[in-house]
Image (cartoon, rainbow, N blue to C red):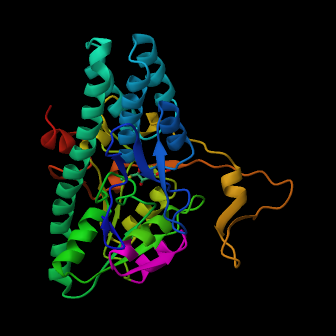
Amino acid sequence: MKIDGTHYRSIWPHKDGDWVEIIDQTRLPYEFGVLALSTMEDAAHAIRVMQVRGAPLIGATAAYGMALAMRADPSDANLSEALAVLGATRPTAVNLRWALEAMRGLLMPLKPGDRADAAWIRAGAICDEDVEINHSIGRNGLALIREIAERKNGRVNLLTHCNAGWLATVDWGTATAPMYLAHEEGIDIHVWVDETRPRNQGALTAWELGHHGVPHTYITDNAGGHLMQHGDVDMVITGTDRVAANGDVANKIGTYLKALAARDNGVPFYIALPSPTIDWTVANGADIPIEERNASEVETIQGRGTNGALASVTVTPPGSRAANPAFDVTPARLVTGLITERGVATASQDGLRKLFPA
Ligand code: MRU
């Protein structure tokens, strides 16, 4: 997607081929900065501290992390070490495991001398595939938005939670791809963007949408139910970090409450996902590991101070404890449909299997 007229993906290999570059998402939306990842440890660190984030981008970064590890030392021992280090960075997004398994399957049978080039090519292919997949998700989600626009004959109000935008993928985004295509097609859309405390990924979504001229409004996490009650939301679309085989969906903390409010108000609630986000090994959402992040993310808020510098202020009183579960699970029964690259599935084992029989 474009920033000030220049097309960027969220991760790309440097043209000399020795390292990869990312957009440092810990500095957005205030500063646009590019960071080089030169080692596997750099890639692991970037995932851990959320310089890159969002399930598909975590997977793509891990794939390049493996390629960087193989450049440094293609031995069996280093291959296993890199898989272990990268695999332990974040627990919920299954795209991480998916990408590492793809790399393991490719690299293990190869002679060490052949591993670095093969890994580099495969990591690039994972990125290219992600872009194609998201574009297809966009086309499938666009049909749903178009339908609402035709029925309503007026502005379509969408609501999204967290950032499932191009910053969370390699390009396009999952939840945002239909929005970008609808906007490009000339459909009058407006997006309610949940702030998404504590990391405020909504600010990333607002930043993205703003750069593409998509009308949007930034709201507190608790505003969605009120807006739905007043008929101001036509459709919710979010992303996901892992979909269980029965269609239960793990996504950023607060997604479940939006789904409940949507059900109570008859608002369609869609989840957009690429197929690598489906975890066929997990029968239902109760078995999805939920990341518990540092309480300091809840105790403080980051932003730009009046002097223009990035600042962090404490919001909790001394002595109060904070908890920080980073994801929750929305039961399949609350999900209207799963927008995938192959079409829109019902949120159930049957629905998923119809689109992904293998
Ligand atoms: O903690 P984050 O910022 O990595 O969480 C991101 C989300 O929850 C996204 O909604 C999800 O990964 C889907 S991204 C297409």
Q: Quadrant of the N terminus?
A: bottom left
Extreme residue toward the right, this view: 318
At 58% from the left edge and 62% from the top edge, which residue is drawn?
197
At 50% from the left edge and 56% from the top edge, which residue is drawn?
25
- Residue 266 versus residue 210: which sits nearer the camera? 210
44 displayed left or right of 303: left
Q: Is residue 344 above or below residue 191?
A: above
> What's the magenta region?
209-230
Residue 4 visible? yes
- Residue 109 versus residue 339: which sits nearer the camera? 109
Residue 227 magenta-highlighted: yes
Q: Position of residue 139 (x, y in %)?
A: 16, 62
Residue 6 magenta-highlighted: no
Q: Is residue 22 above or below residue 61?
A: below
Residue 282 visible? no
Q: In terms of image quadrants, where is residue 158?
A: bottom left
Q: Position of residue 59 (x, y in %)?
A: 37, 39
199 displayed left or right of 230: right
At 55% from the left edge and 49% from the top edge, which residue is drawn?
326
Question: What count of labels does the image hold?
Answer: 0
Q: Position of residue 352 (x, y in %)?
A: 21, 42
Q: Position of residue 100 (x, y in %)?
A: 36, 29
Q: Quadrant of the C terminus?
A: top left
73 displayed left or right of 7: right
Q: In terms of image quadrants, where is residue 206?
A: bottom left
- Residue 351 versus residue 322: which sits nearer the camera? 322
Q: In terms of image quadrants, where is residue 157?
A: bottom left
